[in-house]
Image: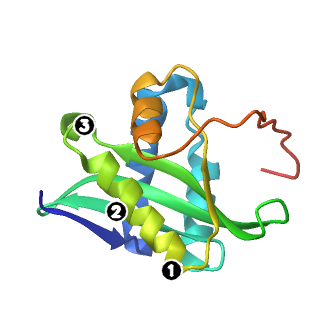
Amino acid sequence: MDISFVAARASDQQLLLDLIRQLREDDPDEGPFDFAASQGAIAMLLSDPSIGRIWLIRRAAEVVGYVALTLGFSIEFGGRIAFVDELLIDRAHRGRGIGRAALEFVETSACALGVRVLLLEVTRSNESAKRLYAKAGYVDRPHQLITKRIGQR
């Protein structure tokens, strides 16, 4: 399989926005696509490696998805943690091991950044993603992630 992971650049912003839109369309439980919020978040992530990384996933010369890793810290886990914030494989390229390769790449990249634990979230309705994550070693914890939006958008 000719898969590569290329660090996204500022010039990739529109492509990333198109991919994020596809992610929201494919999994409506993710919530609606918010162009302005996504655009601002991508710009911050691309300009500040201390908060994370975003990579385009290529198969040969074609972009077939993206994966975003954001960084944090946890006392519970003893140090630096990372969140696989988003992962999308284009519809036409699913089921070919690309998602598995992306998770392996992110894990290796996170280890190089000193990350001790990887976290991710998946919508309850996304059975294919849950199977992929379970095969990659992710386990459900007896905790519930709850959310409160604060600050201006």
Q: Is 96 on the left-hand or right-hand side of 36?
A: left
**Label 1: how many residues lie within 10 Å, few (<14), some (14-19) or many (20+)?**
few
Query: Disc 3 versus disc 2: distance between alpha carbons?
Result: 15 Å
Q: How many numbered discs sit on the rendered protein?
A: 3
Look at 43% across and 33% down and name the residue there. 129
**Label 3: how many residues lie within 10 Å, few (<14), some (14-19) or many (20+)?**
some
Which residue position holds label 3? 94
Q: Which quarter of the figure has residue 74?
A: bottom right
Res 112 label? 1
Look at 58% across and 69% down and name the residue there. 45
Look at 44% across and 63% down and name the residue there. 106
The location of residue 123, given as percent across then percent down, is 57, 28
In terms of sequence position, does the residue under pointer 3 or pointer 1 come before the other?
A: 3
Could you tell me the amino acid type at mark 3?
A: Arg
* Contact? badges 3 and 2 (CB < 8 Å): no
Q: Nearer the viewer, residue 53 or 99?
A: 99
Instruction: Report helix, strand or loop for mark 2.
Output: strand
